[in-house]
Amino acid sequence: MILQAIYITFRDDNAMKLPYFIAIAGFTCGLFAICIPHLSALRIWLGVSTFLSLVYIVTAISLSLRDGIKAPPRDYSIPGTHTNKIFTTIGASASLVFAFNTGMLPEIQATVRPPVVSNMTKALYFQFSVGVLPLYAVVFIGYWAYGNGASSYLLNSVNGPVWVKTFANISAFLQSVIALHIFASPMYEYLDTAYGIKGSALRFRNLSFRIMVRGGYIIITTFVSAALPFLGDFMSLTGAISTFPLTFILANHMYLVAKKQKINSLQKSWHWLNVSFFGLMAVAASVAALRLIVVHSNTYHIFADM
């Protein structure tokens, strides 16, 4: 979608279809995954990722504020039938916890130096307080500026200088490439360890292994993304069946088991409430996501240009 937005900025002739842009994005992600041999090599790229994120955030907020101040009254109602609103909202909650469940990076960084637990706690507190403020700012200011007509990718809605929007779009795309690699890195590291990949990253065996394994993974995910343009529905399903249980249910239950002799009844009730509530949310979100997949399967065809 980001590459498509860049293309449309200069040529709105519909000559390039969405699957083509997905293929280009997949090639870029694969190339980056092969060139970054291990997690520690990401150090400088984390700073680059932060800069690129700030470019997108500042641009989206600034242009949205400018458009919102000048815009006529907007419609803030939620479109659709009552049933669709319920299922869409529940499905969106699963997408949100999946997309914003970014605690892995601070947890990894916190293990670099002791005390590990204290560093991890500080990192997570910072991330889910100060760290989420820019993300919420983009969401709420964008909805305020454009109402229910706001695009799911906010830069598609904003008006401003072409070079500014292009720079922000390129920054968002490159940041997405780095972010994908960060989330996939634990899997890459596990496979490297399991198959004894050691030594120089440029050794023929190591390089060929990265090309086959990481390249193969990117090829498969790129093909699925291009074939199923409503892949966001599967993100909702993933959030429902994995993120809800692992982040909320399992964590609370593990705390109950570990601290059962050290916490009072009120604390126990609170954690059991979390287990019960998020258990219900996981079931409801799974049903909502499956419903959205069925509905969109009947609406869109394979390799559709959305």
Image (cartoon, grey):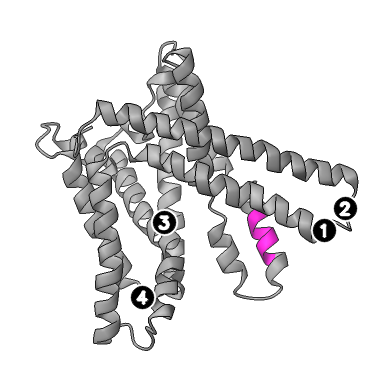
Residue at image mark 2 = 263
Q: Which residue is mark 1?
A: 259
Category of crowding for the residue at label 4, using alpha-carbon neighbours closer than 10 angstroms: few (below 14), some (14–19), many (at least 20): many
Residue at 34% from the left image edge and 87% from the top image edge: 200
Identified by mark 1, the residue type is Lys
Mark 1 lies on a secondary structure that is loop
Judged by depth in the image, the label closer to the viewer, 1 or 4, is 1
Identify the image quadrant of residue 67.
Answer: top left
Q: In which quadrant of the rendered image does the C terminus lie? A: top left
- What is the three-letter code of the residue carrying label 2? Ile
Name which residue type carries label 4.
Pro
Mark sitting earlier along the chain (1/3): 3
Q: Are marks 2 and 1 in contact (CB under 8 Å)?
A: yes
Instruction: Calculate the distance from the C-alpha at mark 1 to the C-alpha at mark 4.
Output: 40 Å
Question: Is 68 part of what is drawn in magenta?
Answer: no
Q: CA distance from mark 4 to mark 2?
A: 45 Å
Estimate the spatial distance between the alpha carbons at disc 2 and disc 1, rounded to whole Å. Answer: 6 Å
Position of 54 compared to 200: left or right? right
**111, 166: nearer the viewer:** 111
Marks 3 and 4 sit apart, C-alpha to C-alpha, by 15 Å
- Residue wearing tag 3: 179
| Residue drawn where x is 64% and y is 59% of the image | 123
Disc with the residue nearer the chain's start (2 vs 3) = 3
Is the C-beta separation of discs 1 and 3 under 8 Å? no
Is the Cβ of the residue at disc 1 closer than 8 Å to that at disc 4? no
| Tag of residue 37 | 4
For label 2, the SS is loop
Report which quarter residue 175 is drawn in.
Answer: bottom left
